[in-house]
Structure formats: C-alpha cells, structure tokens
Image: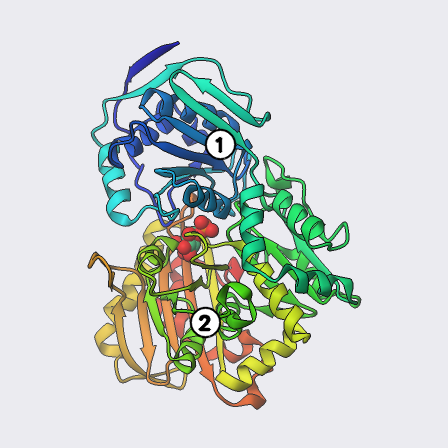
C-alpha cells in the first residue's frame, strides 16, 4: 500500500457558498478538483492525526466514487478512523447526529441538497465541525484560502472498501467502520418524541403521506414511520433512493413536490402530508387542502413545544434567518424568551445553540431544527408535527387558524427567479440600494417605508461580523421586502424576493397569501426594475 503525494495546482472557484461547495458533477470530475478541495479542508481544520472523521452523502450520482477517494485521502492524511454510512449514505441530520454521538473530530457530507442529481447535474461537499454543525465562515474562508495556494495532496494507493457490507475494515493504518446509516438517528428520534402517542394517532382514523422524493430520507422514513411507529405500509411514497432522484428535483415546496401537493389537494385528501429533500434536512408540511409556510411551521412548533417530551420543560430561545417571517418573534415575545435574527445559512445557528441560547431554529427555505443536532432536520420536523397532532387531535388547518387568532398572521411569500444572468441580478439589488435614501418616508404599497439597509450580523457569541446579507426595505407597520442572491445555485444567479405583511384582523386570515401580498409584489418589481432587467414576467418558483 503506497502513500502518494500528488502535485497539483490551485483551481479557481472553490469558495464554499451558503452550504458548502456545490458545482456540476462534470466540474467535480475534473482532474484534482475534488482532491484539491478535500486536501484544503484537511489542511485547514487543525491537527487531524489520530482523529475520527464521519463520512456520508445523500446517495446522488458520483457519491460512491467520491467516498472511496476521500477514504484514501483520509488514510494518507493521518486520520485514525472513518465512520461511513452503509452504501456511502448518511442524511445530513444523521451525519450531524453521528458526529456528535461518537465525538468525531468532524465530518464530510456529500450533497447538493435539493439540487437535481445525475451525470449532468449537481454535486456538493461540505465540512461539519465536531459540534455536528456546518463549518462557520472563518473556517470556510480558511479552506477557500488554502485552495488558492495548494500545491499537493496526499492519497493512498489501495483497493476500494466494500461500502455495502457493515463492519470494520483496514485501509493502511486507518480503520474504516461501515455503519448502519439509520440506527443512531432513529434512536435519537425515539428519545425526543412521544412515540406511543404517535402510534396511537396512526391507530386512529388518521391518514398521512410522506414523500421521500426518491432521495435519502426513504430508508429513514420507512424504518421510523412504517417500522417503529406503525404507519401503514405505503405511507412513505417515492421511498427508494435513486442516484438521479428519479429524474426529479427533490426540493420540498409547492412547485417541485407537486405529486404530493396534488394528493393533499384532491377530493379524498389525507389529513397530513409531508416531504423531505435530497439530503433529508428540509421539510414541507401540508394539511388537507392546506399549506403551512416554513415560517409559520416554526412559530407553531415554538408555541406547542411543551407538548413534545424533549421540550416539555420549555425552550431556551428561538432563532430564525433574517428573511424568515417574524411569526416566531411573536411567539417568543409571548413566551418571554429571546428571538435571534441571523443571516441565511444554518451555520449561523451553531454558536447560539452551543451557548444554550436557543433550542429551536428555522428558515423560510423549508428548514427547521433544534439543538438535538446542529443541522436542520426534515424527519424531525415531521415527527414534531405528528406529536402535536397526536396530542391536540385537531386538523392542521385548525391548528393554524387558532395560532393566527392568537398571534395574528404574518402573510409571507418568497419569489425565486432562477438562472438569471448574473450581471442583471446584481443590478436588480443595486437598483434598490440606490434608492435607500429616497425611499425612506415614502409610501409604497400603501405603507410608509421606515428604513432601508443591507443586513449585517454580529455573532453575539464570537463577535464575528457578516455583511451584505440581504437588501431590506422595512416598513413602519412591520412589513418587509427583502432581496437576496442565493448562495446555493449552480447555474447563473437566483434572485430571491421575500415578502411579508402582518395582519391582526382575524376576518382577513383566510386570504390567499399571493392576494394579500399583491401590492407588495408590485412594489418589489417596480423599485427593483426586475422585469425590465431580467426579461422575466413571473417567478420560477413561488413558495
Ligand atoms: C442551504 C442552507 C440554508 C439556506 C438554504 C438556502 O440549505 O443550509 O441555511 O437557507 O441553503 O440558501 P440560499 O438562499 O443561499 O440558496 P440546503 O438545504 O440547500 O443545504
């Protein structure tokens, strides 16, 4: 078994985005592209000799080949042990769970999340720290800086490991443990939730469909929902993971999860529907003919947390990303707990959770989670809702109507314009920035503009500052229009417009969000000149 040091040269464009490095598979397949990035990670995270690494991915095309390369590089770089999910699989929250449970040094997670998979589609890789959470910006920036001056990487010349067989194997001096990808995560879920109550719900006249979208959550959902909780066989649809996700786009939203949406809006719709994404960290919650926005879902969870055993003593605080609606802020105020507003990206919640300041976190981008791991967690969110439904014995719509009656409704929507020309997208945001001074005090969409700014965040724990995290138009009545460029796309640029308006009047709570926000949508288009600059007359995706 030979250890090689291979000469290489820096490759442009390896700066991690909102959630790691994402690019087309063909880019990752270029000579040295993957190896350079992995070596840059190993060179930037401290002394790894004798340490344990967790490794797994969402099973997308190229996952298995990448696992073998990383194993050989980990061995050559001095790791003592790698814990790898059977078949090379670990959902993102399961990877976080395993890192924490076995006190690993960190983990490499292979995923481009909800982005499509296949030879011409996307791949991704990110490093998670020993707390189980995505590396913070200081670390991702150090990794990026290393990619710019890398000159060699280390790799072992040896046979592949059989990833399908559980057990312990040797690779040079390193031990590789191929472990059950589901067991540790399932055990953690059983500790958090009232499985007896949920089992009782399934024994009643309660119908539920979970869409795994041919992605990583299938095996987890089958074991937990159909196995441990006794949901009828067939509750999990599209439960066989495929390396191209069945040709689909496993993003659990109203556009891409349309198969599930059609079922929940049919005449004989079930009581409850949910979906998760490519790597199992996002979730969508649906009732019979009813969609729960991720922002509302977080607020409902916070308001009902004490119904769930793990949170029965109350929650320490909550956090949401800046573009997420303020619905949870109102719950936090009523509970007398802190609510933190962070930039987009789960990595910003880690410090707050480690410091014990927040228990629940969420983002408008279909992510919710708690301090049980340091990633958002799709199946956890579904179990949280099932636990609430089992205790309250009300419909999803009934729970939301009650919630809005108590706290008021934050009408909310996000409009995405995908694969836009990058220069045009930058100009859309600049147009708004150019009007920061003149908009202040003006009436727009029937509301007075209170202030405009570029959102900046100072981490309350380590004092690090993150600037330019979204262009904001904030109104006196609490309404908001926010413009951001996505940090996760791989084709052109995606513009996101986030729209929010608060309504206290219960008689108006039944309105459709697009109708309630119509004047805000028109105002956003007009101040940014988005239609003129992009040539688009409607968003690619509305959530
Ligand atoms: C990632 C991040 C999330 C973020 C989302 C959207 O999710 O983990 O924190 O909200 O991207 O980011 P952007 O608006 O920059 O595209 P995932 O599920 O893709 O890993």
With respect to residue 244, does 72 lie above or below? above
Front residue of 428/254: it is 254
Image quadrant for the N terminus? top left
Q: Quadrant of residue 482?
A: bottom left
Q: CA distance from mark 1 to mark 2?
A: 35 Å
Q: Please provide percent x and percent y for residue 328.
A: 44, 73
Q: Residue at (36%, 27%) from the top-left corner?
A: 33
| Residue annotated with mark 2 | 314
* Element assignment for label 1: strand
With respect to residue 255, does 103 lie above or below? above
Q: Quadrant of residue 318?
A: bottom left
Q: Label 1: how many residues lie within 10 Å, few (<14), some (14-19) or many (20+)? A: many
With respect to residue 461, does 148 lie above or below? above
Front residue of 313/3: it is 313
Left or right, 384 with reference to 437: right
User: Can I make out residue 62 in this image?
Assistant: no
Q: Please provide percent x and percent y for residue 478.
A: 37, 81
* Element assignment for label 2: loop
| Residue annotated with mark 1 | 84
């Amino acid at each position: 078994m030979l250890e090689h040091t291979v000469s290489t040269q820096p490759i442009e464009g390896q700066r991690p985005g909102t959630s790691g490095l994402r690019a087309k598979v063909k880019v990752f397949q270029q000579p040295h592209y993957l190896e350079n990035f992995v070596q840059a990670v190993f060179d930037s995270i401290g002394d790894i000799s004798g340490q344990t690494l967790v490794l797994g991915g969402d099973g997308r095309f190229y996952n298995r080949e990448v696992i073998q390369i990383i194993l050989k590089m980990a061995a050559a770089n001095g790791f003592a042990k790698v814990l790898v999910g059977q078949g090379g699989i670990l959902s993102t929250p399961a990877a976080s769970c395993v890192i924490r449970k076995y006190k690993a040094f960190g983990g490499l997670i292979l995923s481009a999340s909800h982005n499509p998979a296949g030879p011409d589609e996307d791949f991704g890789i990110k490093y998670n720290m020993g707390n189980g959470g995505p590396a913070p910006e200081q670390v991702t920036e150090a990794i990026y800086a290393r990619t710019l001056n890398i000159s060699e990487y280390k790799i072992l010349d040896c046979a592949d490991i059989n990833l399908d067989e559980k057990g312990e194997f040797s690779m040079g001096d390193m031990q590789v443990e191929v472990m059950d990808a589901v067991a540790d995560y399932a055990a953690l879920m059983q500790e958090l939730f009232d499985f007896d109550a949920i089992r009782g719900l399934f024994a009643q006249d309660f119908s539920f469909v979970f869409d795994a979208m041919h992605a990583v959550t299938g095996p987890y959902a089958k074991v937990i929902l159909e196995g441990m909780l006794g949901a009828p066989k067939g509750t999990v649809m599209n439960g066989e993971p495929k390396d191209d996700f069945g040709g689909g786009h496993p993003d659990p939203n109203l556009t891409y999860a349309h198969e599930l949406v059609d079922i929940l809006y049919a005449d004989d719709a079930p009581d409850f529907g949910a979906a998760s994404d490519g790597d199992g960290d996002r979730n969508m919650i649906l009732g019979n003919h009813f969609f729960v926005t991720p922002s509302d879902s977080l607020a409902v969870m916070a308001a009902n947390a004490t119904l769930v055993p793990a949170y029965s003593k109350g929650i320490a605080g909550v956090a949401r990303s800046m573009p997420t609606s303020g619905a949870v802020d109102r719950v936090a105020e009523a509970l007398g707990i802190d609510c933190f507003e962070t930039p987009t990206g789960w990595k910003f919640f880690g410090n707050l959770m480690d410091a014990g300041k927040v228990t629940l976190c969420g983002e408008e981008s279909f992510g919710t989670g708690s301090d049980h791991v340091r990633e958002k967690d799709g199946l956890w969110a579904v179990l949280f809702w099932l636990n609430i439904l089992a205790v309250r014995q009300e419909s999803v719509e009934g729970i939301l109507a009650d919630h809005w009656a108590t706290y008021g409704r934050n009408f909310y929507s996000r409009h995405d314009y995908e694969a836009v020309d990058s220069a045009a997208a930058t100009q859309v945001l600049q147009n708004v920035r150019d009007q920061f001074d003149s908009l202040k005090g003006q009436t727009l969409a029937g509301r007075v503009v209170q202030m405009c700014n570029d959102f900046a965040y100072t981490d309350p724990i380590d004092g690090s500052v993150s600037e330019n995290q979204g262009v904001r138009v904030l109104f006196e009545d609490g309404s908001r229009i926010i413009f951001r460029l996505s940090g996760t796309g791989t084709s052109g640029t995606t513009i996101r417009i986030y729209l929010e308006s608060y309504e206290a009047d219960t008689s108006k709570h039944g309105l459709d969000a697009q109708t309630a926000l119509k004047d805000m949508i028109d105002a956003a288009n007009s101040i940014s000149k988005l239609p003129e600059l992009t040539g688009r007359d409607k968003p690619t995706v509305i959530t």
